[in-house]
Image (cartoon, rainbow, N blue to C red):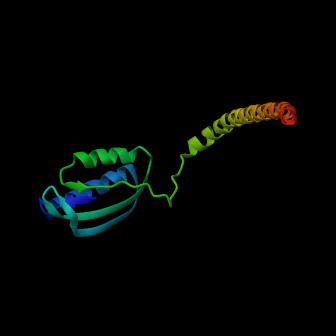
Amino acid sequence: MAFSLKNGEEQVETLKAKFTSLIEANAELISVSEWGKRRLAYPINHETDGYYVLYGFDCKPDFPMELERVLNITEGILRFLTVLRMDAPPKPAPEQEEVDAPVEEAAAAPVEEEKSDDDAAEETEATEAAAETAEDESSESPESSETDED
């Protein structure tokens, strides 16, 4: 997150505390890295400096959307970026893992059977087409040899 310095360091401290408590209430806060005051790559709202803070947290899938909604309506936020870390796979809820596993296996079996039926049908069509082509070529061959002899 990049906080605005337009209203002073007090507002930055207030915003840091607000978002730290919001994240702690809805997620497991892993780290808070304060990068401090930095020059922006380009002016944002006529400001050239911002105060950067990087939050690392684990949460449920619906929390990032709520956090972004709050960030969008909060005065003093210049920019933010929410990123899903791929090195830490999401943890499934224990209830979902037990309940969904049999359903997924049952649903996967018919799909595989349908695919094998489709593959068999395609193979049959290809074989029939090849047989017809071979018959056409064999029936044309005698005619062409007769024509050459005349």
- As drawn, is 113 to the left or to the right of 137? left
Q: Which of 134 and 125 is in front in this view?
A: 134
When the figure is inspected, residue 76 is found, relative to residue 41, above or below; the finding is above
- The image shows residue 58 at horizontal and vertical percentages of 44, 55
Q: Residue drawn at (12%, 58%), measured in percent from left and top?
A: 46
Q: Which of 50 and 96 is in front in this view?
A: 50
Q: Residue drawn at (51%, 52%), measured in percent from left and top?
A: 90
- As drawn, is 76 to the left or to the right of 55? left
- The image shows residue 50 at horizontal and vertical percentages of 20, 63
When the figure is inspected, residue 5 is found, relative to residue 132, above or below; the finding is below
- As drawn, is 126 to the left or to the right of 76? right
When the figure is inspected, residue 98 is found, relative to residue 31, above or below; the finding is above
The C terminus is located in which quarter?
top right
Report the number of discs.
0
Q: Residue drawn at (36%, 45%), measured in percent from left and top?
A: 65
When the figure is inspected, residue 14 is found, relative to residue 101, above or below; the finding is below
- The image shows residue 57 at horizontal and vertical percentages of 41, 57
